[in-house]
Image (cartoon, coloured by chain):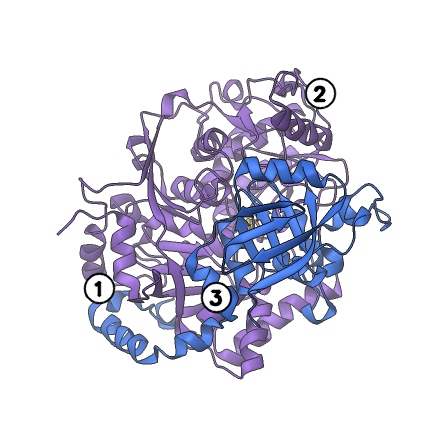
Chain colours: A purple, B blue
């Protein structure tokens, strides 16, 4: 038999049939829905169709979840009520606002053991690539596709090309998965991996915790890839064992045996190979309005002069929006607020990393810390992290997407500059005319205590970087 | 959704890279029911100032009535929000010509009868320069795989699966329901071969 990649193995296991034109009909093992899925529920209602597999469908309130008090507007309350009504009507398990399992969909899937190696997972959200960290075929879909999965538990898809990003060596202190992701996106571009499924490999990837692997796979979409994948290993199995919905007993043993066969065969061929040296990666911040517009924090603001005309125009437009002056050190850029949260960086490890920098220090700017789930919140409070954030002057709030997408009312004001642990520095993402700089949670903490973009490494001297 | 094979309209240039879905429709509008129409939200924060007045210099305000958009690389990157496509379609856009598209956006587009046509970066440069702030008559021929903008006719790349779907206006749910037997057989095998893949119920909590 020919050598197969992890992608091939996952694809083959889920392919029900393939049409002559190359489109595959794939079985969906888990379908995750949220408030934004209302268009899709509306589409199946129009046809009078039921949800094909309510037992494989899970709902969560996250995008519009209030993080302080109740829903900010009647429209937000209606979005949440609509999801509750759809879940009840179709018999779908809902992680609602008062459920201790509630949180951001890409945080709770793994936490609940709903995300497993070898599964195909769909959600009407582009960061579904996060779940690929477990060796699952996980990808974001639009509303028409969500309706299709609801009605049939299947999805039409053409097999993407396999791409491998190998990162060998060791990441330096204060450098993590977020920096690794921004480094490759800056190198290849925000559409650099378009049409591909990325498998991350190499010693630096193996050394990452599940939290770090999820951050890496989460950001695949920011480099244009709908899929990110990491082969499951002992780290994966240890994370999953005993999770509420994970297999148990004989099922667990059988599952682990199946999962152990998933990694790419040694001689499998990838359509594209990229390699990075972990030791060369520094803490990274974005300076522009696309995740590809990122640089090591030690660099200066790019100068459009000297670039080819098309690039110069793009860079100048980004600088104008961001209110930045070319040639100035990035570390001289003063910020107005900070946000630690999102499906990229609001897991327990992320909060520990930020707290390690903030402990005993004061933030010079206001900010929010929103844990990725209620379980992360409880864990952080048990470890006393909430008190570190509060003593630093930051607001410790509830779980949800919050200021990542500014749908629930948590937003950055016009013209304000925010150091953010999120995934998108798009224009207006955190609020109309808001200026977003993406970075790791530890770097956000460094920006908070200095009041400007800052290199976290000196601030970790003599401390245990979590 | 009804299919189409040929479209004649007006082209306009959006001279920007990385027009992401947050720009195509800012998140704050997404709690609006679709029946109310999404066209007014298209590129809202570029089209309208903070007070809601049209920005006179923005190309869609200078050249209203366009149905073909010529733009730069990585159009529709970002979120999976199909609302970005609804905004384009409800505004009246039938085709977008660009060197590259966000993968999820392109699928969403085809599911709503909107053509994401890939053209060479050089061709995009030339068309954008020729269009400037104005419009030109445009013809899209899906079967031939060509777009004509002003005097220029050029080929575009499109997955054959998507071409068929746009022309026939296929509905995937109807198509898939023809395969019900194959799906049921897969489901039965799943329960036997990968029982662990079916989640344990609430008793496990
Ligand atoms: S945290 Fe942000 S990126 Fe993640 S699912 Fe929520 S809105 Fe999307």
Q: CA distance from mark 1 to mark 3?
A: 46 Å
Residue A271: image x %, image y %? Answer: 31, 40
Residue A80: image x %, image y %? Answer: 63, 67
Q: Nearer the viewer, mark 2 or mark 1?
A: 2
In the image, what residue occupies the spot 28% across and 31% down?
A203
Residue A9: image x %, image y %? Answer: 25, 54
Quarter the N terminus of chain B occupies: bottom right
**Which chain is indicated by disc 1?**
A
Locate residue A211 relative to residue A7 in the image: left or right: right
Residue A458: image x %, image y %? Answer: 52, 18
Contact, mark 1 vs mark 3 (Cβ under 8 Å): no
In this rendering, the answer to whether A22 lies above or below A176 is: below
Q: Which mark is residue A249?
A: 1
Q: Is mark 2 within 8 Å of ligand 1?
A: no
**Which chain is indicated by disc 3?**
B
* Secondary structure beneath label 1: helix
Residue located beneath label 3 in the image: B165
Q: Which mark is residue A325?
A: 2
**Which chain is indicated by disc 2?**
A
């Amino acid at each position: 038999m020919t050598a197969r990649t992890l992608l091939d193995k996952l694809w083959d296991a889920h392919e029900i049939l393939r049409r002559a034109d190359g489109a595959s009909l794939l079985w969906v093992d888990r379908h995750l829905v949220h408030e934004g899925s209302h268009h899709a529920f509306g589409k199946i209602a129009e046809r009078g169709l039921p949800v094909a597999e309510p037992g494989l469908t899970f709902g969560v309130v996250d995008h519009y979840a209030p993080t302080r008090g109740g829903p900010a507007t009647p429209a937000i309350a209606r979005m949440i009520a609509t999801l509750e009504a759809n879940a009840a009507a179709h018999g779908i398990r809902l992680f609602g606002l008062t459920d201790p399992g509630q949180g951001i969909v890409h945080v709770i899937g793994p936490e609940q053991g709903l995300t497993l190696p070898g599964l195909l997972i769909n959600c009407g959200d582009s960061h579904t690539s996060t779940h690929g960290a477990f060796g699952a075929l996980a990808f974001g879909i639009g509303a028409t596709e969500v309706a299709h999965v609801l009605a049939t538990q299947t999805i039409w898809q053409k097999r993407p090309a396999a791409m491998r990003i190998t990162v060998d060596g060791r990441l330096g202190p204060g450098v993590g998965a977020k920096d690794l992701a921004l480094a490759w996106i800056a190198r290849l571009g925000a559409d650099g991996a378009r049409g591909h499924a990325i498998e991350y490999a190499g010693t630096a990837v193996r050394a990452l915790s599940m939290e770090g692997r999820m951050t890496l796979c989460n950001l695949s979409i920011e480099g244009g890839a709908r899929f990110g994948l990491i082969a499951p290993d002992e780290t994966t199995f240890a994370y999953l064992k005993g999770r509420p919905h994970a297999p148990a007993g004989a099922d667990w043993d059988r599952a682990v045996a199946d999962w152990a066969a998933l990694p790419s065969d040694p001689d499998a061929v990838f359509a594209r190979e990229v390699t990075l040296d972990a030791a060369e990666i520094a803490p990274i911040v974005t300076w522009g309005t696309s995740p590809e517009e990122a640089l090591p924090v030690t660099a200066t603001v790019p100068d459009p002069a000297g670039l080819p005309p098309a690039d110069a125009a793009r860079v100048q437009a980004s600088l104008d929006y961001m209110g930045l002056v070319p040639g100035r050190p990035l570390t001289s850029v003063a910020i107005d607020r900070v946000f630690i949260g999102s499906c990229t960086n609001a897991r327990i490890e992320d909060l520990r990393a930020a707290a390690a920098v903030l402990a005993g220090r004061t933030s010079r700017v206001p900010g929010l810390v929103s844990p990725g789930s209620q379980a992360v919140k409880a864990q952080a409070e048990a470890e006393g992290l909430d008190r570190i954030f509060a003593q630093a002057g930051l607001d410790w709030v509830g779980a949800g997407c919050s200021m990542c997408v500014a749908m629930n009312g948590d937003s950055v004001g016009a013209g304000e500059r925010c150091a953010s642990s999120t995934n998108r520095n798009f224009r207006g993402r955190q609020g109309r005319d808001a200026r977003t700089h993406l970075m790791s949670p530890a770097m956000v903490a460094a920006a908070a205590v200095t009041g400007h973009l800052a290199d976290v490494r000196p601030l970790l001297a003599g401390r245990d970087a979590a | 959704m009804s299919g189409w094979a040929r479209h004649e309209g007006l082209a306009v240039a959006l001279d920007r890279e990385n027009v992401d879905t947050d720009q195509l429709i800012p998140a704050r509008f997404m709690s609006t029911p679709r029946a109310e129409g999404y066209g007014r939200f298209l590129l809202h924060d570029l089209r309208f100032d903070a007070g809601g007045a049209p920005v006179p210099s923005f190309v869609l305000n200078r050249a209203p009535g366009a149905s073909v958009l010529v733009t730069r690389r990585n159009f529709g990157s970002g979120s999976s929000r199909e609302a970005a496509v609804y905004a384009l379609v409800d505004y009246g856009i039938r085709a977008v010509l660009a060197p590259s598209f966000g993968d999820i956006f392109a699928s969403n587009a085809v599911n709503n009868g909107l053509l994401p046509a890939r053209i060479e970066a050089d061709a995009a440069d030339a068309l954008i320069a020729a269009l400037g702030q104005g419009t030109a008559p445009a013809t899209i021929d899906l079967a031939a795989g060509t777009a004509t903008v002003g005097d220029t006719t050029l080929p575009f790349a499109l997955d054959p699966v998507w071409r068929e779907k746009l022309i026939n206006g296929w509905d995937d749910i109807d198509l898939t329901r023809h395969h019900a037997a194959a799906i049921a057989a897969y489901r039965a095998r799943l329960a036997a071969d990968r029982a662990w893949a079916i989640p344990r119920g609430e008793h496990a909590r």
